[in-house]
Image: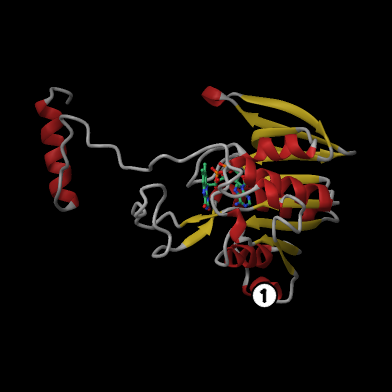
Amino acid sequence: MKILVCLKQVPHSDARLDIAGDGKWIQEDNIKFEINSYDTYALEEALKLKDAGEAEVVAVSIGPDRVTQALRTALGMGADRAIHVNDPAMEGSDSLGIAKVLAAIVKEESPDLVFAGLMSEDGNFAAVPPMVAQLAGLPSSTAVMSVSLADGTVTVERELEGGALEVVQLPTPCLLAVQSGLNQVRYASLKGIMAAKKKPMDTKTAADLGVGDQVGAGAAKVEIEKVYTPPRGEGAQLIEGSADEVATQLVGKIKELGLL
Ligand SMILES: Cc1cc2nc3c(=O)[nH]c(=O)nc-3n(C[C@H](O)[C@H](O)[C@H](O)COP(=O)(O)OP(=O)(O)OC[C@H]3O[C@@H](n4cnc5c(N)ncnc54)[C@H](O)[C@@H]3O)c2cc1C
């Protein structure tokens, strides 16, 4: 069995984010990055299937040079090989451009299962996985909370509103976009990190995958007009001070409003 895992590298959750000079994205040159947390759950689910039987796990990521770090982490955790799409022509790609490249890899690799995260923690479109499935002609399921595989059929539990779960069956090959928290993500062991150095990482461009004319700003159908921090709402007050001072002031305000 072959399992492809789509990983996006996103700003570290502790990073202080500043808006870039053109007002269209965040400034990326002064922050640390990590694997999108939803994708770490996707990778863990793939590695669990590998642990339970025979499987090759291939990690795929699109992004600049720094993305090799995310892929090395994935290899250190247990993925067998990695594919890095590193192509300046991808600059300015919208979700469809990203999806076209991932779908081209799916077609080239013919995996039995494709795992992705439900959404990315920076762009937050939650659009790429269903688009990849559509473009690659695969059935798919989103918000996946559990996965079991028997006789070529995948049974998943999907998270619905209000804590309800929906059970869905899909044939393989299929794509699953996972919700966070569906498993306990492992750490890369020291042995794993050492072994990762020898594992193969292919670097490709969109043109190598036959979709060079379908990516980048020129092909994007969505335009980001601006990124900004919303103005503070009227009546909003920022309480400053030590934790004790803030807590005391906050309780005072709540009492003032008659809520306590
Ligand atoms: C006009 C426009 C211009 C843009 N320009 C740039 C740019 O120059 N540089 C830039 O970095 N971004 C750019 N973006 C953002 C980029 O298009 C998004 O990262 C992309 O649309 C994916 O959306 P998302 O990250 O919200 O993914 P979601 O759909 O929320 O992601 C869900 C899942 O898809 C998979 N996935 C998503 N992205 C990747 C990836 N890169 N590699 C592997 N798997 C992935 C992951 O499994 C992820 O958990 C631009 C967006 C627009 C609309």
Instruction: Say whether residue 229 is visible.
Output: yes
Which image quadrant is residue 233 in? top left
Which image quadrant is residue 16 in? bottom left
Q: Looking at this view, is 209 or 139 the one in front? A: 209
Residue 60 x %, y %: 69, 56
Q: Tell whether 22 sits left or right of 154.
A: left
Q: Mark 1: is the Cβ under 8 angstroms from ligand 1? A: no
Q: Looking at this view, is 156 or 234 the one in front? A: 234
Which image quadrant is residue 83 in? bottom right
Look at the numbered disc 1 and give the secondary structure of its residue.
helix
What amino acid is labelled 1 in the image?
Lys
Residue 22 x %, y %: 37, 51
All told, the count of numbered labels is 1
Q: Looking at this view, is 142 or 9 the one in front? A: 9
Q: Tell whether 203 sits left or right of 255.
A: right
Residue 209 x %, y %: 76, 54
**Colouring used for the render:** secondary structure
| 112 vs 154: above or below | below
Mark 1 residue crowding within 10 angstroms, few (<14) / some (14–19) / many (20+)? few
The quadrant of the rendering that contains the C terminus is top left
**Residue visible at 13% across and 22% down in the picture:** 258
| 230 vs 209: above or below | above
Residue 20 x %, y %: 37, 54
**Residue visible at 42% across and 49% down in the picture:** 25
Q: From the image, tell me which residue sits under label 1.
A: 191
Q: Which residue of the protein is positioned furthest toward the right in this rendering? A: 151
Instruction: Say whether residue 183 is visible.
Output: no
